[in-house]
Amino acid sequence: MALINIQSAIKQVQQIVRKLEPPQGVEILTYKRNRGITIIKIDEENLSVQERGYQENTFQVDMGGLAKLLKSISKREFPRSRKVRVYQLDSPYCLGVKRKQI
């Protein structure tokens, strides 16, 4: 997917996650693809959010708390980024796939 403005990416990710079927997910990556956030839909209301980059964390959150969590993680992981890449994952097994690095 193309580069997306980070402010609109959070809203777009929320819309995408609502439409997904468990255990599909979404991955948000920096331009270089070296840091990112992965969201896996566990069931209709619960999500697993993984932070990879400056810090390595895993969070369990419901759909209502996703926006607040994404905003705080994105400030920490993408401090100077204005554009991010968003990929849709068909299953959690797609996490190990290496993306082309620039």
Image (cartoon, rainbow, N blue to C red):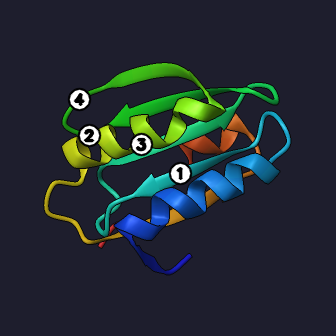
**Numbered badge on residue 27:** 1
Instruction: Provide the residue designation for mark 3.
Output: 70
Instruction: Provide the residue designation for mark 4.
Output: 55
Q: Does 59 sit left or right of 53 as displayed? A: right
Residue name at image x 80 percent, y 26 percent: 43
Q: Decide which of 27, 63 is in the foreground and name it.
A: 63
In the rendered image, the quadrant that contains the C terminus is bottom left
Residue name at image x 64 percent, y 34 percent: 63
The part of the image, by quadrant, that contains residue 52 is: top left
Is residue 100 something one can see in this rendering? no
Disc 1 marks a residue whose amino acid type is Glu
Is residue 81 something one can see in this rendering? yes
Q: Mark 4 touching mark 3, by CB under 8 A?
A: no
On the image, the x and y values in percent for residue 32 come to: 29, 66
Q: Mark 4 touching mark 2, by CB under 8 A?
A: yes
Of the numbered discs 1 and 2, the one sitting upstream in the chain is 1
Q: State the separation of the CA atoms marked 1 and 4.
A: 16 Å
Instruction: Provide the residue designation for mark 2.
Output: 53
Q: Residue furthest front?
A: 64
The correct choice, above or below, for 14 with respect to 50 in the image is below
Q: State the separation of the CA atoms marked 4 and 3.
A: 14 Å
Q: State the separation of the CA atoms marked 1 and 2.
A: 13 Å
The part of the image, by quadrant, that contains residue 29 is: bottom left
